[in-house]
Amino acid sequence: MKVLDLQCPASHVFEGWFGSEEDFQGQLARGLVECPVCGDKQVTKKLTAARLNLGSARAGEGSAAPAASASSSAASAPATTPPAPQPPADMPVALQAAWMKAVRHVMANTEDVGERFAEEARKIHYGESEERGIRGQASPEETRSLLEEGISVLPLPVPKGMKGPLQ
Ligand SMILES: [Zn+2]
């Protein structure tokens, strides 16, 4: 099955499903392809190579090589090229940058209460202390009991270089 982006002289764009490129050409020659909007039979193939390539790759059409959609008979070449995929090697760096930013944001907007974290979190939760963002150390047991009391705590791993102010 081949999905073609088609266009009539009135610039209506629509999709046509054909068994093959030849099937499309044959139906077109016999006047069987018409615009669903205005019924015009002067239908031409709209070249969107990037999209067609993606489509055939996803559908697993082994016979439809990417080059097949780059028909030389059509009027214009595709204006857009697909975006270059990001090299996977770049991902950890980008994630790390976002994570560092998040950590810095938390550190800039919270009060360091150190080892009194669990105590302070409880006080804030029960209205005994001013409502504010805090950070500090809590043991896994403390964290668990805070969560059981309905107090939201967020474990945040901190990069080694930034540990100083937290300890
Ligand atoms: Zn039309």
Image (cartoon, rainbow, N blue to C red):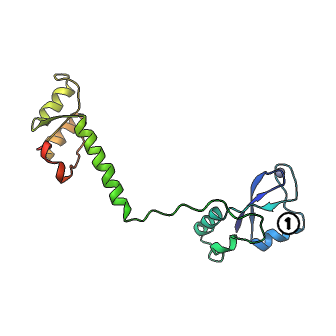
Residue 153 in view here: no
Q: Nearer the viewer, residue 155 or 107?
A: 107
| Residue 48: percent from left, percent from top | 68, 61
Residue at image position (62%, 63%) is: 50
Quadrant position of the C terminus in the picture: top left
Whether 52 is drawn above or below 14: the answer is below
Which residue occupies the extreme bottom position in the image?
Answer: 63
| Residue 140: percent from left, percent from top | 15, 46
**Picture quadrant of residue 54:** bottom right
**Picture quadrant of residue 47:** bottom right
Q: Nearer the viewer, residue 118 or 54?
A: 54
**Picture quadrant of residue 118:** top left
Number of residues whose C-alpha sits closer than 10 Å to that of mark 1, classed few (under 14), some (14–19) or many (20 or more) = some
Q: Name the side, left or right, on which 150 lies relative to 71.
A: left
Q: Is mark 1 within 8 Å of ligand 1?
A: no
Residue 45 in view here: yes
What amino acid is at disc 1?
Answer: Leu
Q: Secondary structure at mark 1?
A: helix
Whether 97 is drawn above or below 60: the answer is above
Per the image, the residue denoted by label 1 is 28
Residue at image position (30%, 46%) is: 101
- Say how many tags the image has: 1
| Residue 3: percent from left, percent from top | 70, 64
Residue at image position (48%, 63%) is: 85
Whether 50 is drawn above or below 109: the answer is below
| Residue 161: percent from left, percent from top | 17, 52
Q: Name the side, left or right, on which 113 lies relative to 26.
A: left
Quadrant position of the N terminus in the picture: bottom right
Q: Name the side, left or right, on which 80 lies relative to 154.
A: right
Residue at image position (17%, 23%) is: 129
